[in-house]
């Protein structure tokens, strides 16, 4: 356990944290849900590779204040930079620049100690706090992408046409 500002602590997730972690995700991203059973199963698999990843829960007594993780491939690709991903998310009511920086630094140190040479952080376009903190800490925008936006009603003609072309291509 590492004491952060105030009474908050950062600690590795445990299988019994799945409900709290899922609640933290929903608090940060109300449009996303996470199934605690799926999280538990993923974590149990990840725990077999402790040198390749770390997931943390940021708590203030019993309240989830944030989530953090770092991850890297199981094996590095020869001739490619050793890339790892770092990520910190603070719940909207508990956002703190100092704690974000402290937690991100810890994620970076963990990833680098696993052999990473290049660090990548990801955030969503609708997370102004997280984007601003990453920029403040020296991260540059490398690329942007949309993970999902589809209006079925407005896109029905295009979707049906695409489905038809795909089916024809199979024959």
Image (cartoon, rainbow, N blue to C red):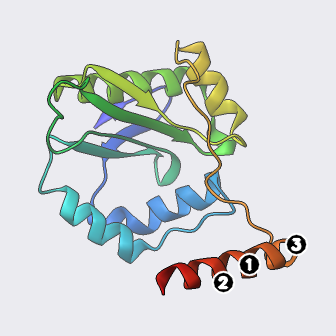
**Residue located 57% across and 38% down the image:** 123
Indicate which disc, 2 or 3, sits on the residue closer to the N terminus: 3
> Disc 2 to disc 1, how far (Cα)?
5 Å
In this rendering, the answer to whether 14 lies above or below 68 is below
Q: Are marks 2 and 1 in contact (CB under 8 Å)?
A: yes
> Disc 2 to disc 3, how far (Cα)?
18 Å
State the image coordinates of residue 107 (x, y, percent, origin top left). 34, 30
Q: Which residue is labeled 1 in the image?
A: 161
Callout 1 secondary element: helix
Q: Are marks 3 and 1 in contact (CB under 8 Å)?
A: no
107 or 151, which lies in front?
Answer: 151
In this rendering, the answer to whether 41 lies above or below 170 is above
Q: Place residue 158 in its image quadrant.
A: bottom right
Assess disc 1: are there few (<14), some (14-19) or many (≥20) residues with their C-alpha within 10 Å of its C-alpha. few
Judge left or right: residue 73 versus residue 35: left
**Residue located 74% across and 66% down the image:** 150
Quadrant holding the N terminus: top left
Numbered circle sitting on residue 164: 2
Front label number (2 vs 3): 2
123 or 168, which lies in front?
Answer: 168
Assess disc 3: are there few (<14), some (14-19) or many (≥20) residues with their C-alpha within 10 Å of its C-alpha. few
Judge left or right: residue 48 versus residue 98: left
State the image coordinates of residue 115 (x, y, percent, origin top left). 16, 25
55 or 86, which lies in front?
Answer: 86
Q: Which residue is labeled 3 in the image?
A: 154
Callout 3 secondary element: helix
Assess disc 2: are there few (<14), some (14-19) or many (≥20) residues with their C-alpha within 10 Å of its C-alpha. few
């Amino acid at each position: 356990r590492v004491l952060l500002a105030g009474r908050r602590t950062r600690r590795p997730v445990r299988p019994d944290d799945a409900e709290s972690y899922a609640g933290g995700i929903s608090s940060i991203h109300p449009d996303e849900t996470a199934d605690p059973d799926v999280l538990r199963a993923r974590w149990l698999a990840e725990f077999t590779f402790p040198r390749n990843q770390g997931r943390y829960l940021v708590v203030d007594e019993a309240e989830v204040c944030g989530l953090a993780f770092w991850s890297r491939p199981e094996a590095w690709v020869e001739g490619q930079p050793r890339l790892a991903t770092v990520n910190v998310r603070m719940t909207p009511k508990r956002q703190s620049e100092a704690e974000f920086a402290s937690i991100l630094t810890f994620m970076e140190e963990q990833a680098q100690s696993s052999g990473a040479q290049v660090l990548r952080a990801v955030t969503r376009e609708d997370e102004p706090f997280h984007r601003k903190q990453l920029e403040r800490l020296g991260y540059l925008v490398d690329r942007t992408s949309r993970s999902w936006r589809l209006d079925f009603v407005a896109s029905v003609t295009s979707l049906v046409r695409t489905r038809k072309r795909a089916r024809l291509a199979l024959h």
